[in-house]
Image (spheres, rainbow, N blue to C red):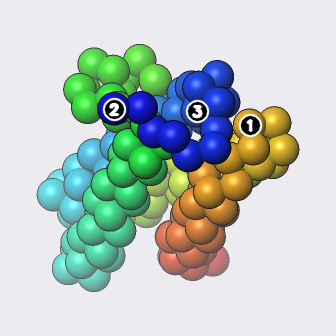
């Protein structure tokens, strides 16, 4: 059943396409954070293990909220690994070791990339597509990612 919520189909299509990319980015970041949680080694193993666990739990909630936002505006969320890899702006880990700081540098870059992507969509969602709800939604997400990035950044001197 079509969502009759005061937005044109053209506009919900455009917003949904950007939300699909965001969902893919969030899922890839979640997977990379899970990897860090499972595979971190080194002097601060326990603290890092717990830190990464807290981060992937936050990302799990974000993933669900992005997919549900897509459903609220009348679209289906992509839900396959293949589609995520086709849509994401992020990459797999490059040369790295399993130390906490190595994982954190990579994850920090991903959070900052997502922040920039979200920031670039706030105004178009509101002004171009008249989807103030999605604009407000991603504004809230940017704040979560900024805090998560700050937490990671705080590990570096």
Determine which of the numbered discs, if any, sits on residue 83 in the image. none
- Which of the marked residues, 2 or 1, is nearer the chain's N terminus? 2
Question: What number of labels is visible?
Answer: 3
Question: At numbered mark 1, what does the secondary structure look like: helix, strand or loop?
Answer: loop
- Which of the marked residues, 3 or 2, is nearer the chain's N terminus? 2
Task: From this view, report whether residue 61 is shown above or below residue 18.
Answer: below
Residue beneath disc 1: 129
Question: At numbered mark 2, what does the secondary structure look like: helix, strand or loop?
Answer: loop
Q: Quadrant of residue 94?
A: top left
Give me the residue at 63% from left, 44% from top.
Answer: 6
Determine which of the numbered discs, if any, sits on residue 1 in the image. 2
Residue beneath disc 3: 12
In the rendered structure, the answer to whether residue 40 lies left or right of residue 115 reads left
Q: Specify few, some or many for label 3: CA neighbours under 10 Å numbering under 14, 14-19, or 20 or more.
A: many
Say whether marks 2 and 1 touch (CB < 8 Å). Answer: no
Say whether marks 3 and 2 touch (CB < 8 Å). Answer: no
Q: CA distance from mark 2 to mark 1?
A: 21 Å
In the rendered structure, the answer to whether residue 89 lies left or right of residue 29 reads right
For the N terminus, the image quarter is top left
Say whether marks 3 and 1 touch (CB < 8 Å). Answer: yes
Give me the residue at 24% from left, 78% from top.
Answer: 50
Q: Residue furthest bottom?
A: 47
Q: Specify few, some or many for label 2: CA neighbours under 10 Å numbering under 14, 14-19, or 20 or more.
A: few
Give me the residue at 28% from left, 19% from top.
Answer: 82
Of residue 5 and residue 37, the one placed in the foreground of this image is 5
- Which of the marked residues, 3 or 1, is nearer the chain's N terminus? 3
């Amino acid at each position: 059943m079509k969502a009759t919520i005061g937005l044109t189909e053209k506009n919900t299509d455009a917003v949904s396409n950007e939300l699909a990319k965001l969902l893919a980015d969030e899922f890839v970041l979640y997977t990379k954070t899970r990897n860090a949680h499972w595979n971190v080694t080194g002097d601060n193993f326990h603290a890092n293990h717990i830190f990464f666990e807290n981060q992937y739990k936050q990302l799990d909630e974000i993933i669900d909220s992005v997919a549900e936002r897509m459903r609220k505006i009348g679209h289906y969320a992509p839900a396959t690994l293949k589609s995520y890899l086709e849509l994401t702006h992020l990459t797999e880990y490059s040369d790295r070791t399993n130390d906490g700081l190595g994982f954190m540098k990579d994850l920090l870059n991903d959070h900052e990339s997502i922040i920039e992507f979200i920031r670039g969509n706030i105004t178009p969602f509101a002004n171009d597509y008249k989807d103030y709800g999605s604009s407000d939604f991603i504004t809230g997400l940017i704040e979560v990612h900024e805090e998560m990035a700050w937490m990671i950044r705080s590990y570096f001197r």
